[in-house]
Image (tube, rainbow, N blue to C red):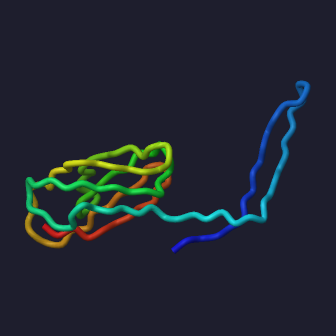
């Protein structure tokens, strides 16, 4: 689901040594889309590897990847590129019991989570 809003930009500058603040508003909608993640496979066995890609994160933010309960700690941390995209190849599935797990990706700057079901 996307969210539309109008944009407001504030620009601070100095003209001849005097600080000045200028506000500008646009009537054009700014579209925000929540992060999305795609896996190369949504099932796997322990010690096997899988890859993922994602977009919609804050550019340059660290993204923690969790399998199941987040209190167990992140499996890995990846960094979004300058467009807010993430990629990871050959992430190894840990030794866990078979079942349905939530694979969560949480942006550390935005605190925005995205989750998919992963079957082991």
Is 75 placed above or below 118 here? Answer: above
Left/right placement of residue 93 relative to residue 25 reads: left
Give whichever of 92, 101 is nearer the camera: 92
The single residue placed furthest to the top in the displayed view is 17
| Residue 40 in which image quadrant | bottom left
Q: Residue at x 42, y 53 (%)?
A: 107
80 relative to 28, above or below: above
x then y, percent, for residue 119: 17, 70
Q: What's the residue at 10%, 61% (across, down)?
A: 96
Q: How many marks?
A: 0
Q: Quadrant of the C terminus?
A: bottom left
Please state the horizontal and vertical placement of residue 98, each as a whole percent of the image. Answer: 9, 69
| On screen, residue 1 above or below 66 | below
What residue is rendered at 50% in x and 50% in y?
58
Q: Quadrant of residue 8?
A: bottom right
Residue 15's x, y, as percent? 89, 30
* Residue at (19% x, 49% y) in the render: 90
Quick check: 12 left or right of 66?
A: right
View extreme (front): residue? 40
Left of 34 or right of it: where is 7? right
Location of residue 71 in the rendering, given as x and y in whole percent from the top left corner = 27, 57
């Amino acid at each position: 689901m996307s969210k539309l809003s109008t944009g407001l930009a504030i620009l601070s500058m100095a003209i001849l040594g005097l600080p000045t603040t200028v506000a500008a508003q646009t009537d054009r909608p700014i579209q925000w889309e929540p992060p999305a993640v795609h896996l190369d496979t949504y099932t796997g066995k322990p010690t096997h590897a899988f890859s993922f890609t994602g977009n919609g994160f804050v550019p340059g933010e660290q993204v923690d990847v969790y399998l199941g309960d987040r209190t167990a700690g992140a499996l890995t941390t990846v960094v979004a590129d300058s467009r807010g995209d993430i990629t990871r190849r050959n992430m190894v599935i840990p030794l866990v019991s078979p079942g349905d797990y939530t694979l969560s990706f949480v942006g550390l700057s935005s605190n925005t989570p995205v989750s998919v079901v992963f079957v082991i």
